[in-house]
Image (cartoon, rainbow, N blue to C red):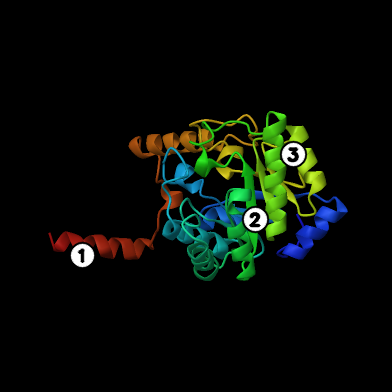
Amino acid sequence: MAETKKKTSIPQFLKMKRDGKKFTMVTAYDYAQATQVDKTDIEMILVGDSAAMVMLGHKSTVPIDLDTQILFSRAVVKGAPNTFIVGDMPFMSYEVSREKAIENAGRLMKEAEVDCVKLEGGVRVADTVAAIVKAGIPVMGHIGLTPQSSSQLGGFKVQGKDFSAAQKLLDDALALQEAGAFCVVLEAMPNPVARVITERLTIPTMGIGAGPYCDAQVLVMHDLLGLFDRFVPKFVKQYAQMGKDVVDALAQYDTEVKTGVFPDENYSYHVSEDAEREILEHFEKTK
């Protein structure tokens, strides 16, 4: 990692696209996680609505609300001042009307101080994206497998597996670019489809389960660190098995407490022998 990390700007991300230089995003949901990311060269953090699943235990991303997203985002912003922060807009925070979408995107920017917002959908949300961008709020798009609408898609399934579906994804990506989005997440689609979209767009593509041709990649922190074992998507490479390490450490702590090994003298506070004797004599007299 570089000695001094500086936050990457949107113009710099666009230049990286033009120069063929890849960049990286990872999710984070609290201050401690964010501080760790900020110590690396990872350029972006997504405060994802995936917090609903990995932090709050829900079965999907749908239940999380805007106030909760703001709470998580605010903590991450404090922990990673040198990393570009993307605030996810939760389900039904931008679908009701353009006015409501602008208001809610504005809340994420003002109350959490994120650097941009992300929302799901292509052609159907292009007008909303354009309105948010016109209001001065940077937007990252998200197409392909869009978890908030996974019920309509038949579950968490690969998208764009035939010509018509692939064409729709390209149309979605182009619509988001035309609307003013500065980056588009491509989730769960075949490599050739993601490659064509990446080649056709002048803005960066952010892949997650979309192969190696995207301009950038994102993974959920809990997935790549092995902290979330409910299921592991096919596209996730686990770089650690920290879940097992955590369980082993907790079990050892429990054993040491119950056997009297912890805490020993190394983890205890002490006074001088004279002070200890005086204290004990005082308590003996007051029995």
Give the amino acid type for the residue marked by disc 3 in the picture.
Answer: Ala
Residue 253 lies left or right of residue 181; in this view the side is left
Q: Residues within 10 Å of mark 1 (few under 14, many from 20)?
A: few
On the question of residue 181 being in view, the answer is: no
Which quarter of the figure has residue 116? Answer: bottom right
Marks 2 and 1 sit apart, C-alpha to C-alpha, by: 68 Å
Tell me the residue that label 1 is attached to: 282
User: Where 282 sits versus 208, above or below?
Assistant: below
Give the amino acid type for the residue marked by disc 2 in the picture.
Answer: Met
- Write the residue at 58% across / 59% down: 128
Question: Residue 77 at x, y = what percent?
Answer: 56, 63
Give the amino acid type for the residue marked by disc 1 in the picture.
Answer: His
On the question of residue 281 being in view, the answer is: yes
Residue 210 lies left or right of residue 18; in this view the side is left
User: Where 147 sits versus 285, above or below?
Assistant: above
Tell me the residue that label 3 is attached to: 194
Could you tell me which quadrant the C terminus lies in? bottom left
